[in-house]
Image: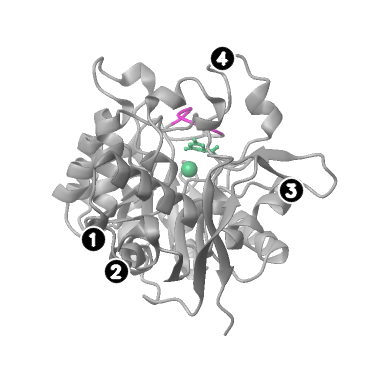
Amino acid sequence: MQLKNIKRLELPATADMHVHLRQGDMAKLIAPTVRQGGVDTAFVMPNLVPPLITVAQVLEYQKQLMAITHGVKFLMSLFLHPSITPEVIAQAAEAGITGVKMYPQGATTNSDSGVSNLESFYDTFSAMEKHGLVLNLHGEVLESLAPSGTTLEEAFLPTLKTLHERFPDLRIVLEHCTTAAAVEAVRACGPTVGATITAHHLYLTSNEACCDPFAFCKPIPKEPTDRDALVRAVTSGDPKFFFGSDSAPHPLQSKTSASKGKAPAGVYTQPYVTQLVLVALEEAIERGVIMEADVTQDKLEGFLSRFGRTFYRLPESPENRIILERKEEKIPVSVVSEKGDIEVGISKAGTEVFSLTWEQV
Ligand code: DOR
Ligand code: ZN
């Protein structure tokens, strides 16, 4: 496929296996942008205020999201916390909750009640293994625990291996992986271990993340070699790697008014997630990291839609399809709420992208 010369693409709807949709008025602005990006299935993160630590809270949140927007299947998660006992896992499985997200305490946005000692959750993981819930890992160690000369993600990888060895039937996702070492570590594990890759980690590096608040996120984008290893994982056709945008909206003002290095972490890509993956692949072809022939219809479908669904045991092909056409559309600077009181900056504003429509059935 010569991506650069392609004027029209038809794909199955994208499955976005890692989204932040927030709550209240922010959720009302953000949740409808899921469909805009070509997504019909979204796995929703639980790092709200307060975090979602009961089955009832998760179900209430799902109801709110479904009231805001139609045409998206919201897969839900609990926030790993001492109150998530094996009994809660049994209830969660019964209620159709998909996964449990582990945040190291204080590692990122709204993670103050996160985990400080993973071993204390082994009974919970055992119950998750038994009931078929997925363990979703924010795979970073705390800065205070990181040996020098290695990234927070690389320092976490031995923990991934330990968890997999201890719970071989537990499905584990290393979320938003960002390093060549993480790609290798996930490959080295059995088929119960997968990883999400975002759109933005396919085009950002530490050079932008250090200095542009709209490129700042956790895990921080790394070296060009890491970015390129992620691109190769995407076009490898390996079903262990599937799309999860980690689109994470923050009020524009909180990004622009923060002093240097203090902006909240999160890159907002949701309204253009599918297109931004294509932009990143085009850029990688231009850099010579991959060849035109490495991007095929089958590989795009696999990464964007099929592999995530398969890992999560959903039907492989969605009922919905999307059409992408080149019409000189450019990514706008932001999305703004109806009242004008909430604005969120979009990543890569000004970039020309495919225009996306949903196929009528
Ligand atoms: O950059 C990030 N933003 N990384 C995360 O892990 C959380 C997210 C958020 O919720 O803002
Ligand atoms: Zn996230």
Find disc 1 in the rendering and name its residue. Answer: 237
Give the residue pinned by disc 3. 24
Of pointers 4 and 1, the one earlier in the residue sequence: 1
User: Is label 3 in contact with label 2 (beta carbons under 8 Å)?
Assistant: no
Estimate the spatial distance between the alpha carbons at disc 2 and disc 4, rounded to whole Å.
42 Å
Q: Residue furthest bottom?
A: 361
- If the image is split into quadrants, where does the N terminus sit? bottom left
Q: Which percent across, then down, holds residue 278?
A: 41, 53
| Displayed quadrant of residue 161 | top left
Magenta residues, start to end: 105-109
Nearer to us: label 1 or label 2: 2
Q: Which residue is drawn at 32% across and 68% down?
A: 297
Q: Distance between the residues labelled 3 and 2?
A: 38 Å
Q: How far apart are marks 3 and 1 (CA)?
A: 38 Å
Residue 110 in the image, given as x and y percentages of width and height: 56, 34
On the image, numbered disc 4 is attached to which residue? 260
Three-letter amino acid code at disc 2? Asp
Residue 314 lies in quadrant: bottom left
Left or right: where 135 falls relative to 359: left
Q: How far apart are marks 3 and 4 (CA)?
A: 28 Å
| N-terminal label among 3 and 2 | 3
Mark 2 lies on residue: 298
